[in-house]
Image (tube, rainbow, N blue to C red):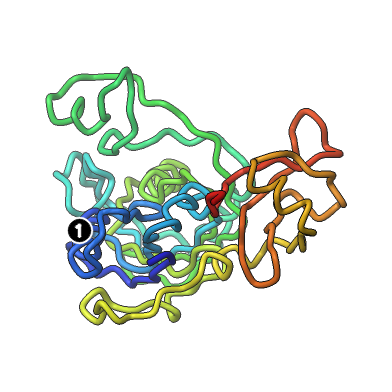
Amino acid sequence: MDGFLYIDKSEGLTSRDVVNQIVKIYGTKKVGHTGTLDPLATGVLIVGIGRATKLIDEVTSYYKEYEATVKLGIQTDTLDITGEIQEEVPFKMPSKEKLNDVLTSFLGKSMQEVPKYSAVRLNGKRLYDYARSHEKVELPKRKIDIKEITLLDVTKDTFSFRVTVSKGTYIRSLIRDIGLNLGIPCTMSSLRRTKVGSIKVEDCLSLDSITPTTKVHSLDEVLDKYPVYELSPKEEKYVLNGNKLKNKTYGSKVRMKVKDELLALYKVDEKDSSMLKCDVLLKVKK
């Protein structure tokens, strides 16, 4: 079986827990997920089965939309409500205008410091291992892009917002930085991933509802944002051999198809933009 499952992950499960359940349900070890959700977080988790695992990196790179709730006045070691409180202060709730100004100041590209409790590797070791052993290290920074950010609701000690971000963005870290700009320690109290690419949480199934007969989404469907290149018989042989093809201005990436069969995902050659080269080969030459 080859394809994707769109799952609405429930709170308390790790992304790996979900993968393990799918392995048992479908009886295959060739399963992977496209972007980790912490146990606290819920929402869209796309799981690839069979040949779909070749596209894990591709789907993980899609922009993601989240809805987050922020608890003001406290800071924890994990940057979310599950951690140990390191700072707790009295505060005056900022106005909606102030919150809007601070949120929109994060729009665009920037460098973000990753959380110390994360699976990012530093010198071959996970950051959370350093944190658990109380070893101090310089936390790495990553380039991120925030496309949209909108204030949703405000209470006496919390506010919520919706945000669309690039791969590698930590919402916990974003909330920490929002707190620094407000001058009030902040921590994440809830997080829901509502969209990955064009796939919405409304398109997802609960893990409990998945059975061996649940239909998976095709590889072609998940790549539908990319144009299609209809191959001639000669070009089909080139593609199955992983050879380059002329770029006919299709875009940055192209689905290579013969009739209704998806053979590969190609991309513009960085060294020669007049050519397309193989990014992911999805069909093995017989």
- In percent of the image, x 35 and y 20: which residue is there? 138
Q: Is residue 10 above or below residue 208?
A: above
- Local secondary structure at mark 1: helix
| Left or right, 30 with reference to 263 | left
Residue 9 x %, y %: 29, 68
| Left or right, 109 with reference to 120 | right
- In percent of the image, x 53 and y 50: which residue is there? 284
Q: Is residue 250 above or below residue 269?
A: below
- In percent of the image, x 63 and y 48: which residue is there? 240
Residue 272 x %, y %: 82, 32
Screen quadrant of the N terminus: bottom left
Residue 50 x %, y %: 38, 58
78, 192: nearer the viewer: 192
Which residue position holds label 1?
20
Looking at the rendered structure, the kind of residue marked 1 is Asn
Report how many numbered discs are placed on residues in the image: 1
Residue 286 x %, y %: 54, 51
286, 82: nearer the viewer: 286
66, 225: nearer the viewer: 225
| Left or right, 153 with reference to 264 | left
- In percent of the image, x 16 and y 44: which residue is there? 85
Which of the 4 quarters of the picture holds residue 213? bottom left
